Image (cartoon, rainbow, N blue to C red):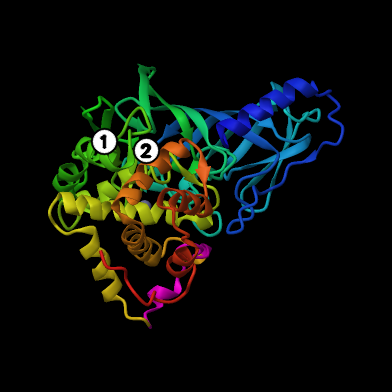
């Protein structure tokens, strides 16, 4: 859902209008949600509240089949609407009636219901499909990684296309039920809590549930053999971690890092406020990639992350995203600094806790390491462009900017800001402009010049504020 306010306002509107079935003025929903970086991502005309996935995955052939049922509310009269998806669809129904469907562009699935949908109406869309996701490429890549014994969906900004149809943009967050049947003896890992696990006829069905709003790219699925561990944070949040048993030399370091999840959640809660979800954890599948992703409540870690030793810094980064990115999600992909700047800064807070450096010293090191003519400074963290969205500068310059902000507004306002931000936008979306407004309110300072210099200028800031 976009925000609680908008969702309830839409519901009220629906009641008041009592929209007729004819839905006068209805038209097609837009094929994109309006993101300047990714014009075709997400869609217009409806707002999803829940995804219910009922899938079956055969690791031997990398075959994924099943039905995803979407509960949504029309935000305009609709003659048709788009979903984002890349596997092969065999059937679509809207409120139980067969609907026409066609593919368009790279990942658009255009659904035309038997009758137009009135604005404010709640609809149920069921999509039945199958595919071999590792073989399906969009824009020249697949976000589905094969492992020796299964497959994994985890990527940013898009991974949903390879396993469920969706309104694929962080603006439209929703709750999830994910049911996946896998051959008996295998496990399926996803977000949230495991509600049940049943075995019969040679298949085991896992039912995972995410009750809090979750962006589509933060939904994750892994199937294969996993060793699953359980612990709890100090406040009792269940921590569920999973490790592929074939990580080889990386296994010991992976476990020594990820098993500190509860401790690091407790540490970060001291800065960011109460942990926003009802479970935490991570998983390490045997994938060849080198990145990690802050999948909501269940972080994805590539084994290579731990190839040089214990790496609790990356765990602190991904867990910081649970507040900065997952709880409060960006409104447009150009707001990526709100995710990566803060998650990187959290690594420095953790370093201070571990006595390996202070945020002030680590920020100074990054500032000094890049001379003024280094292309590093040509990336504007506040608007890096889609090609530089995950550039080092978004992370490192972005984190230096946060230390500079701390030095500018003082510890008291800064530490309040770190806590108030997640509380103010809990389970919603926000922009850098929203963040600036809050920082100005809490500090009583005009920060227009500061944000211009540190986030929106393609040059090295002339001075680094003294701590
Ligand atoms: Zn990150």
Q: Is residue 3 left or right of residue 346?
A: right
Residue 139 at what x, y percent from top left?
56, 58
Residue 370 at what x, y percent from top left?
31, 76
Q: Which image quarter is the C terminus in?
A: bottom left
User: 191 or 232: nearer the eye?
Assistant: 232
Residue 192 at what x, y percent from top left?
38, 29
Few, some or many residues within 10 Å of mark 2 (<14, 14–19, 20+) = many
Q: Residue at x 15, y 54 (%)?
A: 309
Residue 307 at what x, y percent from top left?
19, 56
Segment tinted magenta in the rendering:
373-386
User: 281 or 95: nearer the eye?
Assistant: 281
Few, some or many residues within 10 Å of mark 1 (<14, 14–19, 20+) = many
Q: Which image quarter is the N terminus in?
A: top right
Q: Residue at x 34, y 60 (%)?
A: 399
Q: Are marks 2 and 1 in contact (CB under 8 Å)?
A: yes
CA separation in Å, label 2 and label 1: 10 Å
Closer to viewer: mark 2 or mark 1: 1
* Residue 150 quadrant: top left
Which residue does the numbered mark 1 point to in the structure image?
A: 242
Which disc is residue 222 wearing? 2
Q: Earlier in the sequence, mark 2 or mark 1?
A: 2
User: 87 or 237: nearer the eye?
Assistant: 237
- Judge whether residue 29 can be spotted in this image: yes
Considering the numbered disc 1 on the image, is that residue within a helix, a strand or a loop? strand
For label 2, being within 8 Å of ligand 1 is answered no
Q: Is residue 45 left or right of residue 212?
A: right
Considering the numbered disc 2 on the image, is that residue within a helix, a strand or a loop? strand
Residue 321, relative to residue 448: is it above or below?
above
């Amino acid at each position: 859902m976009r925000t609680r306010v908008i969702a309830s306002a839409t519901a009220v509107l629906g009641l008041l209008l009592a929209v007729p079935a004819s839905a006068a003025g209805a038209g097609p929903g837009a094929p994109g949600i309006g993101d300047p970086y990714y014009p075709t991502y997400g869609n217009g005309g409806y707002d999803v509240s829940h995804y219910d996935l009922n899938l079956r995955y055969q690791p031997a052939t990398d075959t994924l089949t099943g039905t995803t049922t979407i509960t949504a509310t029309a935000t305009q009269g609709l003659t048709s609407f788009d979903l984002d998806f890349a596997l092969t669809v065999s059937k679509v129904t809207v409120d139980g009636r067969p609907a026409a469907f066609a593919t368009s562009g790279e990942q658009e699935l255009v659904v035309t219901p038997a009758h137009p949908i009135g604005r404010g109406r709640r609809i149920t869309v069921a999509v039945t499909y199958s595919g071999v996701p590792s073989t399906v490429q969009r824009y020249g890549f697949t976000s589905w990684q094969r492992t020796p014994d299964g497959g994994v969906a985890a990527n940013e900004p898009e991974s949903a296309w390879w396993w469920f149809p969706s309104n694929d943009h962080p603006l439209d967050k929703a709750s999830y039920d994910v049911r996946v049947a896998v051959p008996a003896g295998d496990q399926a890992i996803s977000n949230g809590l495991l509600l049940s696990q049943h075995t019969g006829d040679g298949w085991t069905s896992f039912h995972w549930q995410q009750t809090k709003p979750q962006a589509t790219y933060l939904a994750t699925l892994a199937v294969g053999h996993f060793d699953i561990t359980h612990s709890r944070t100090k406040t009792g949040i269940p921590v569920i971690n999973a490790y592929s048993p074939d990580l080889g030399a990386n296994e010991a370091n992976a476990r020594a890092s990820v098993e500190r999840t509860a401790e690091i959640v407790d540490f970060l809660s001291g800065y960011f406020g109460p942990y926003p979800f009802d479970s935490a954890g991570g998983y390490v599948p045997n994938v060849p990639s080198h990145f990690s992703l802050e999948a909501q409540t269940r972080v994805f870690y590539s084994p290579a992350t731990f190839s040089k030793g214990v790496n609790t810094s990356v765990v602190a980064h991904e867990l910081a995203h649970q507040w900065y990115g997952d709880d409060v999600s960006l409104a447009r992909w150009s707001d990526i600094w709100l995710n990566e700047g803060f998650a990187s800064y959290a690594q420095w807070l953790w370093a201070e806790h571990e006595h390996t450096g202070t945020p002030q010293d680590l920020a100074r090191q990054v500032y000094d390491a890049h001379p003024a003519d280094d292309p590093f400074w040509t990336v504007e963290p506040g608007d890096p462009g889609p090609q530089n969205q995950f550039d080092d500068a978004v992370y490192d310059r972005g984190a230096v900017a946060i230390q500079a902000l701390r030095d500018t507004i003082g510890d008291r306002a800064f530490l309040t800001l770190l806590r108030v931000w997640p509380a103010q936008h809990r389970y919603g979306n926000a922009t850098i402009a929203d963040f600036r407004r809050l920082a100005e309110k809490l500090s009583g300072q005009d920060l227009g010049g500061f944000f211009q210099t540190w986030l929106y200028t393609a040059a090295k800031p002339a001075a680094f504020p003294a701590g």
